[in-house]
Image (spheres, rainbow, N blue to C red):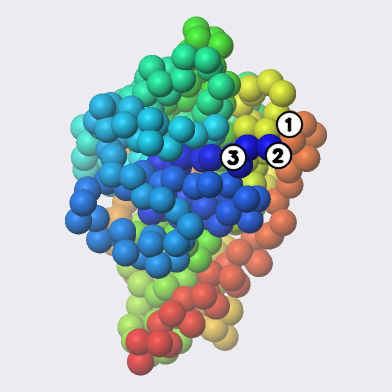
Amino acid sequence: MSEVKRALITGITGQDGGHLAALLHEKGYEIYGIIRGQHNPKREAVISEFPYVTLIDADLTDQSSLIRAMQTARPHEVYNLGAISHVGYSFKDPMLTNDVTAKGVLNMLEAIRLTDPENTVRFYQASTSEMFGGLEYNRPEKGYTEESAFHPRSPYGVAKLYGHWITQNYRESYDMFAVSGILFNHEGDRRGVEFVTRKITNAVARIKLGLQDHIELGDLWPKRDWGYAGDYVEGMWRMLQQDQPKDYVLATGETHSIEEFLDLAFKEIGIEDWKPYVKQNPAFMRPAEVDLLLGDPTKAETELGWKRKVDFPGLVKLMVQHDLAVESKKI
């Protein structure tokens, strides 16, 4: 009888952590999740939704706690999803972003190296399309690939690029099975309301129900390659099931503006012209913005057999309907 696989997930309280926990549970894994702080307000929510996840108190900025987590979980696979992941916030607190999102990756890799002398643990690092930067001179016609040049435009992107390169360095230096998934924007009903897509769908639902009359946003012209997070965590898992460790881009191969997202979201509640309901607020505009991000998922589709299932209109509909259900319960 084969041994039950064990997985350790950092960022278990986030969007991707939740989707990944559900996926691995379906596959019969024993799952451990790292949670920061004894009084973390998200602890009870995780316990309630994922009773099959064993929570371990640890912190990406504290390597000793990660070593203890590795010794407790004894995982076959480690998924490092934890980060200060809001791009706008990274401009406000670049030091914390660096400590968690950049140095946290090194702390996790070292914890694995020190507790896994036989080099059997497989490591997944959550890289991001924000590492590319979206600059016009740096933009490939068919979308960014695994070989495209990087030019991050935010402290978050810079920190993620460090995590990406240190993962590659440990793979080459210590022969670790360490991979990075370069994921383009992936959204869904688990997304925090501080992120623009969920901010829009939550506001649209509340406008429909008469709970608010407008939404305040920053720039509306940036374009993103938006997919569904539930599809993307399957790609993460597939990366760790390969014979050889490689980095992969996960994307839809399409790009849509925030205005297009607004169009579909408001139409879902029967409003054709959203302009009277949207106010632009300079407070939500960033010092440096990425105008367009488009990914080329050819390598992942060919080698991993991965392909997104939920299209852009389906994603917006899913999110609006979820928020309508959530906000209706508050009335």
Identify the disc placed on residue 233. none
230 or 251, which is in the foreground? 230
The residue shown at (53%, 47%) is 30
**Residue topped by disc 2:** 1
> In the image, is residue 139 above or below residue 278?
above
Q: How far apart are marks 1 and 2 (CA)?
A: 34 Å
Q: Dot 1: few (<14), some (14–19), or many (≥20) neighbours within 10 Å?
A: some
The residue shown at (63%, 22%) is 245
Q: In this view, does 208 lie to the left or right of 287?
A: right
Element assignment for label 2: loop
Report x, y in % for residue 16: 49, 50
Q: Quadrant of the N terminus?
A: top right
Amino acid beneath label 2? Met
**Residue 327 shows in the view:** yes
> Which residue is outermost to the front?
1
Identify the disc placed on residue 5. 3
Q: Are marks 3 and 2 in contact (CB under 8 Å)?
A: no
Element assignment for label 1: helix
Report x, y in % for residue 143: 65, 35
Residue 108 found in image quarter = top left
